[in-house]
Image (tube, rainbow, N blue to C red):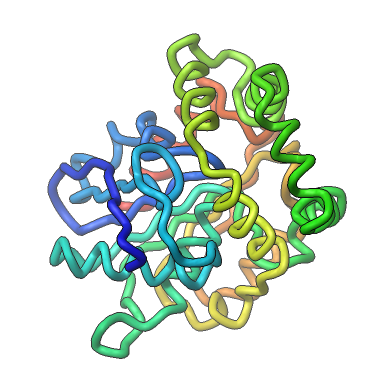
């Protein structure tokens, strides 16, 4: 679709799992989950179009279009996922994939769904983030934002302050910075503006697969108290809020992620 070249990694054994990385990231966002995922799943972890090593499509960047690209990718690989995992902005792309019909006209049937800090509906996004994305993504201010984000010091501040965990290794921090520098700001803008406006509650209310929702109680992007409502909205959802955790992962949060994923995936 749109002449897109999608790169990524695949491997492991078991149920097919499609992994959708976070904001301005790449498949490497999942590296710390691989020890748990690879023995249990046949993992497909692409760089979303416009991020990592994947090309920028000619189509307008919208969640629905990126969901369709993921359908085209899994069709090309003859690998329909039974497990769907998304991080941050990637949860919105993953849910757009789930909402879109495949080539046969049917929605994917999942065995497991994992969502980390999902902006599942506008009320689940912190107001400052929702308003900031809409304002800075406007045609008037976005050119100025592009100039600001081209400055290395600004990108480094964003990564270190809002994304990186306090005890992150220099290697992992370097990967985050590298991924951010490779991200298409035009694509990031289109997906982020859609994500803070999309309401996936009707879709999620129909998901019958067991669902694990993860978030830190100090996450700067989502309203964690609102995310707890997913246990009421969804038939089989479990929401786990990690205390004293933000958006960035620490060694302790990763260890807890691994324990929860191992238990959840069986």
Above or below residue 93? Residue 216 is above
- Res 266 seen here: no
Q: Seen in the image, is 70 located left or right of residue 201? A: left
Q: Seen in the image, is 187 located left or right of residue 74? A: right
Q: Seen in the image, is 128 located left or right of residue 236? A: right
Which residue is farthest bottom?
105
Which residue is farthest top?
170
Measured as percent of width and height from the top left, residue 131 is found at 85, 55
Question: Residue shown at 54%/32% (left/top)?
Answer: 180
Measured as percent of width and height from the top left, residue 4 is found at 32, 57
Above or below residue 244? Residue 224 is below
Question: Residue shown at 32%/48% (left/top)?
Answer: 46
**Quadrant in the picture for the N terminus:** bottom left
Measured as percent of width and height from the top left, residue 59 is found at 46, 66
Question: Residue shown at 30%/46% (left/top)?
Answer: 45
Q: Nearer the viewer, residue 99 or 65?
A: 65
Q: How many marks?
A: 0
Q: Quadrant of residue 244?
A: top right
Question: Residue shown at 36%/65% (left/top)?
Answer: 2
- Res 182 seen here: yes
């Amino acid at each position: 679709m749109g002449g897109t070249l999608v790169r990524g990694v695949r491997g492991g054994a078991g149920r097919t799992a499609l992994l959708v990385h976070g904001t301005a990231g790449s498949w490497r966002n999942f590296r710390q989950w691989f020890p748990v995922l690879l023995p249990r799943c046949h993992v497909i972890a692409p760089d979303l179009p416009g991020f990592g090593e994947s090309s920028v499509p000619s189509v307008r960047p919208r969640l629905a279009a990126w969901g369709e690209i993921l359908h085209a990718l899994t069709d090309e690989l003859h690998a329909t996922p039974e497990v769907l995992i998304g991080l941050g902005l990637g949860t919105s792309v993953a849910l757009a994939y789930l909402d879109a019909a495949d080539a046969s006209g049917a929605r994917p049937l999942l065995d497991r769904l994992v969502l980390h800090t999902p902006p599942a509906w506008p009320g689940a996004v912190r107001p400052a983030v929702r308003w900031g994305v809409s304002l800075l993504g406007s045609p008037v201010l976005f050119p100025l934002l592009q100039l600001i984000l081209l400055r290395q010091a600004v990108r480094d501040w964003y990564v270190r302050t809002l994304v990186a965990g306090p005890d992150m290794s220099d290697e992992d921090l370097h990967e985050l910075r590298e991924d951010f520098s490779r991200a298409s700001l035009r694509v990031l803008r289109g997906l982020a503006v859609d994500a803070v406006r999309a309401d996936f509650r009707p879709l999620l209310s129909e998901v019958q697969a067991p669902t694990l929702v993860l978030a830190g109680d100090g996450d700067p992007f989502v309203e964690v108290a609102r995310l707890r409502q997913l246990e009421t909205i969804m038939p089989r959802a479990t929401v786990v809020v990690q205390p004293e955790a933000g958006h960035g992962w620490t060694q302790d949060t990763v260890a807890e992620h691994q324990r929860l994923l191992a238990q959840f995936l069986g």
